[in-house]
Image: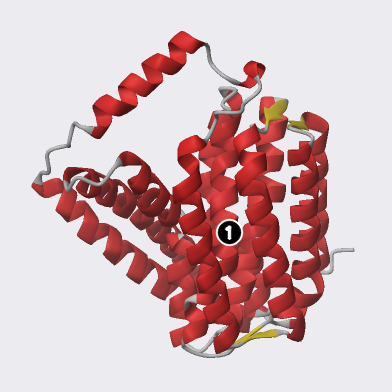
Amino acid sequence: MVIFWIIIFIVSLGALVKGADWLIASAEKIGLALGLSPFIVGVTIVGVGTSFPELISSFVAVFKGVPDVVAANAIGSNIANILLIVGVSAVIGKRLIVTKSLIDLDLPLLAISTVLLLGIVWDKQITLGESILMLVTYGVYLLYTVLHKDAEGSGEIAEFLPSRQERRKNIATRKKEEFTRPKLVAKDFILLVVGVLGLVFGAKYLIDALVNLSTMLNIATGVIAITAVAVGTSLPELLVSAKAAFQKKSEIALGNIFGSNVFNALVVIGLPGLFRILPVDNQTFAIGVPTMALATFLFVISGISRRIHMWEGAFYLSVYVLFIAKLFNWF
């Protein structure tokens, strides 16, 4: 019976992640076809869509009566994003460059959202008022990002920028793309529907499997959520970032981490928190919360130095291994 629910867990996780991919791809094309700018589509549909698996699984967890999964899922995803994804990317790329735009805008916002989350979970629960505060904060973050991203790259140090000719070519390409609306076909709407169904049913059976495995293996649901669910929902970002690091595209490897972590901290917890008080289980509070704080602190320090070296990536991975070991009492 345990093997059966493990298979259900893996298949559901795959459906959840793939459903998000199809939803993002179709929604992005539909948005562009309706006349939305590529920047707005990128910030909203693509930026938010990468965290859909965490958000939908958290909603399902609340309505199925396991609300402790919500905080564990978001905190676990943020830990995996930094320690696992950035760690692997730094080891593969040997050195990641943190651009000035990430330092000036994204790094402070990541730090602020993490500090806010730490303050909110201090009493081991998330109330309605705190959830509203988190969502308002995310609204401010989104507005600030939209208003200031257009100036991105204007103050970069020369070594981090492409040549002037390349920049002109990139700008021309972007302008051309902005005025060329893609044509919609039936496949786009089919993918949209299939993506939504994949998210909904994938999340439903994922939580069912999580609850059953928790009972059978005598492991807290929060522990499974903060490890297996968090890593599983972060796999697409891991593959994208690892590939980008191998190709020496540091900004792609790192950029998604910032937005994803802010969304997890404020929205993945904030939206489900509108429906009921969300508890933070003991292991998530005692091990997950301090690890997230440490991971974010290390990431901020590495970001300020503008480079994340291979040895730092290896250190990130060793901290992640220690985090997993402490959760399961391996040593």
Amino acid bearing label 1: Val
Q: Where residue 47 sits in the image (x, y, percent)?
A: 44, 50
Q: Where residue 8 sits in the image (x, y, percent)?
A: 45, 67
Residue underneath mark 1: 262
Would residue 314 appear left or right of 261 to someone viewing this image?
Answer: right
Quarter holding residue 2: bottom right
| Residue that appears at 19% across and 45% down | 35
Q: Where 37 falls versus 171 (above or below)?
A: below
User: How many numbered circles are shown?
Assistant: 1
Would residue 205 appear left or right of 135 to someone viewing this image?
Answer: left
Badge 1 element: helix
Q: Where 173 falls versus 216 (above or below)?
A: above
Quarter holding residue 79: bottom right
Identity of the residue furthest to the left in this view: 186
Using the image as rendered, state which of residue 228 and residue 274 is in the foreground. 274
| Residue that appears at 81% across and 66% down | 290
Identity of the residue furthest to the right in this view: 331
| Quarter of the picture holding the C terminus | bottom right
Using the image as rendered, state which of residue 227 and residue 306 is in the foreground. 306
Would residue 200 appear left or right of 271 to someone viewing this image?
Answer: left
